[in-house]
Amino acid sequence: MGSNVSEVVSPVDGRPFTEVPAATEADTDAAIEAAARAFESWRAVAPGDRARLLRRFAAAVDAHVDELAALEVRNAGHTVGNARWEAGNVRDVLDYYAGAPERLSGRQIPVAGGLDVTFHEPLGVVGVIVPWNFPMPIAGWGFAPALAAGNTVVLKPAELTPLTAIRLGELALEAGLPPGVFTVVPGKGSVVGQRFVTHPAVRKVCFTGSTAVGKSIMAGCADQVKRVTLELGGKSANIVFADADLERAAAGAPASVFDNAGQDCCARSRLLVQRSVYDRFLELLEPAVRGFRVTDPADEAAEMGPLISAGQRSSVASYVDGADVAFRGSAPDGDGFWYPPTVLLARGPDDRHWREEVFGPVLSVLPFDDEAQAVALANDTEYGLSGSIWTRDVGRALRVARGVDSGNLSVNSHSSVRYWTPFGGMKQSGFGRELGPDALHSFTDVKNVFIATE
Ligand code: NDP
């Protein structure tokens, strides 16, 4: 790899603590071309053998969960509890897709004069571009199904958070994946990521990150009719009806937006509360927000760590300056990129903090009067990724779930992700589905073969 390096800074104290190589364009081309060569043999590996290698990769991740978690605590400021979950999620996703090679079957379609069958053919080299907010899971959601379907993968971690990806690349080799099948290429988006878009041997780009970069990647991929999956921003609504279990909804609301310091595309950052219980709900919410534990992320009791960078902290602060603060929690003083959990009262649906993805620990609150208005306000956004509905009325829960234009909704819950169910956005939150069986098929092309018998 070329001589460029990037400094890696810990958001916990704001200090650089290591450096990693930053690939040049020539390095990136070499990695892509090695992946293209490896594809020719990987696609031909017997399904049972491919499954076994993925299970060994999963076992290697499992044996290193604590080590991977410690890297993420330092590099991304994730709480140690979350970071362990994230490493475990990579293991689980690999295990889940290890079941796929032997089940990825086509169909036999009745025709006259012969036999017609379909095959799910791998695409070739898949480029996975990962953001800094969830470096491990988002990487795994791309590379595990891609590898299971017979593709080879080049993976670009975010420049701010390359360490766990680099370690996962080493573990893949230790587990016996042939060289070139899964290659981590750390470096800049404008160099490495762009080359994934422009190099003709990359047949699909899986991108997670900002909507602006996602649009430019989609435009770039059009040139070669390259497949693309986009998982972009969100501004998800958390809708609380008057008949809901208010105590439960309020207890879970802080984590639904402040988890990962709010740097979560699924963050329920717009809280809509029915007017008749609005004051009561804020009374319940306040102690939960004030008590949210923001501290050294290596502390087992931590619920939130710092933001990723000084730049992200200034960006978050720019939404809070001049807004109506209802109440806020506390955050440590010190050199890290700390910011307290903050609840803002929206003056209306045109407030900037209500409309834009803040990507920080900021919750905006607005009252609504009835079901129709709740759905209209929830949909009054360019995004459509996630959201929650709190009510004891089953009919209403289903009506609202069908009415809100969002790829992932939960009723009386704040969960968004299960590795065996589909995940992805509507509108400008992107398209294509990760996880579950849908993701697997997005890494293949259907080929139809007719064999004449007459
Ligand atoms: P970006 O969209 O810039 O970065 C995401 C990934 O894309 C990184 O690996 C980045 O590389 C890479 N990249 C950047 N530019 C290009 C390019 N031209 N071609 C190919 N790859 C590229 O997100 P940011 O890190 O700048 O975050 C900015 C904002 O985006 C956040 O504040 C947040 O609002 C939103 N965001 C949303 C996410 C989500 O999950 N919805 C995730 C991350 C960010 P590099 O690290 O080298 O820049």
Image: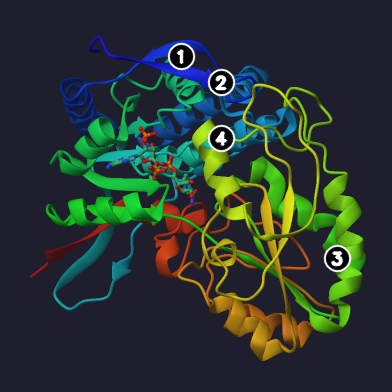
Rendered position, 358 above or below 426: above
Give the amino acid at mark 4: Val
- Between marks 3 and 2 in the image, the one whose residue lies nearer the viewer: 3
Which residue, given by chain and number where applicable, does mark 3 sit on? 282
Q: Nearer the viewer, residue 34 or 219?
A: 219
Give the amino acid at mark 2: Ala
The percent position of residue 416, horizontal first and vertical second, equals: 64, 57
Q: CA distance from mark 3 to mark 2?
A: 46 Å
Number of marks in picture: 4
Which mark sits nearer the N-terminus, 3 or 2? Answer: 2
Q: CA distance from mark 1 to mark 4?
A: 16 Å
Instruction: Verify CB contact (< 8 Å) between mark 4 and mark 3.
Output: no
Which residue, given by chain and number where applicable, does mark 4 sit on? 90
As drawn, which residue projects farthest toward the front?
Answer: 322
**Mark sitting on residue 60:** 2
Q: Nearer the viewer, residue 85 or 163?
A: 163
Observer able to see residue 49: yes
